[in-house]
Image (cartoon, helix red, strand yellow):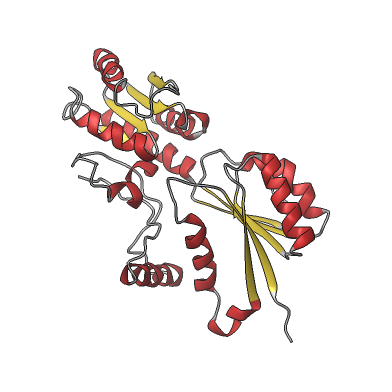
Amino acid sequence: MSKVIKIGFLFPCSSIHPTMSRDIIDGFYSAVPKQYKRSFQFIPEYIDQGRKELIKVAINKLITFHNVDVISGIISYKSLPDILPLIRQRDKIGFFFDMGEYLPPVNTLPVDLFSNSFLIWQMEYALGNWSQATFKGKGAMLMSVYDAGYHMHSAFWQGAISAGAQETDVHVIPYHPESRSILPVLPSFFEKIEKSKIDYLHALFCGNESIDFFMAFKASPLYGKVPLIVSPHMVCEENSGNTGIPDIHCYSASGWNYHSASIQNNSFKNYTNQKKERKLPYLQLWDTNRD
């Protein structure tokens, strides 16, 4: 009898991509030839918000209790120094996914660890470069305190600098635990941004905050006057299909070329079409130049 390969998955809670764990496991299955599907077993482990201690506990459980051959799932680059020793001392393989919200480590990854990234930081860099080259002058960034905790805005800023930007305004909406919505505070930020006479605005929000932003921006004096560039998260299918978002003209980046003729892309399109037919949500990457 052939050996069953056990793959342990680390999955955090994600309100932005609620079907993330199922999509990733489905993606693995879709790449496995039919005759070998019974040779793989997937064991998911919940890691809540992805804190290092919870990740370490989950990895130890997957290795010592479930005896998995591969550790996979969604983690942050920042966790690698803490979890690599756990994986390597038991001679396991690591294959991880990340959103690309942090810049990758400068040191070379070991040969037994692999990473598959959405590379949002690269898309943000490209957005910054394109925005500055297209609209010139001075740009501004507006983001929540949550999004400010990642490297995405830094990548956008570096991209703008590479295109000749001399000055970029940065606005961060502070955390207000007593309020679940940023709608009440957005008008004051739009007023400051309007007075600063910028040539383009880049917004970085997630989940419900992005919906609040779109509603407030369309009602603001900036709409129709200042080009709006939004982070890829803000135009992913989970958001763009929300009826609460008004029709609005904006720009974003795309991490997926739907029309690519590669074997891998055609296989992925077949998979997403099957999900549509079953009326199940799937993770479509990003739309571009959405009206």
Q: Residue furthest front?
A: 178
Residue in view at x 55 percent, y 75 percent: 32
* Horizontal arrangement in the rendering, residue 257 relative to residue 289 (left or right): right
Q: Can you say which quadrant of the picture contains the C terminus? A: top left
Residue 258, x across and y down, in percent: 34, 61
Using the image, determine if residue 28 lies above or below residue 4. Answer: above
Residue 211, x across and y down, in percent: 30, 37
Using the image, determine if residue 185 lies above or below residue 51. Answer: above
Residue in view at x 34 percent, y 23 percent: 140
- Closer-to-camera residue (187/114): 187
- Closer-to-camera residue (228/70): 70
- Closer-to-camera residue (191/185): 185
**Residue 124 visible within the image:** yes
Using the image, determine if residue 86 lies above or below residue 150. Answer: below
* Horizontal arrangement in the rendering, residue 242 relative to residue 78 (left or right): left
Please give the count of numbered marks on the rendered protein. 0
Residue in view at x 43 percent, y 20 percent: 174
Q: Can you say which quadrant of the picture contains the N terminus? A: bottom right
Residue 35, x across and y down, in percent: 57, 85
Residue 183 position by quadrant? top left
**Residue 105 visible within the image:** no
Residue in view at x 34 percent, y 30 percent: 202
Residue 50, x across and y down, in percent: 60, 43
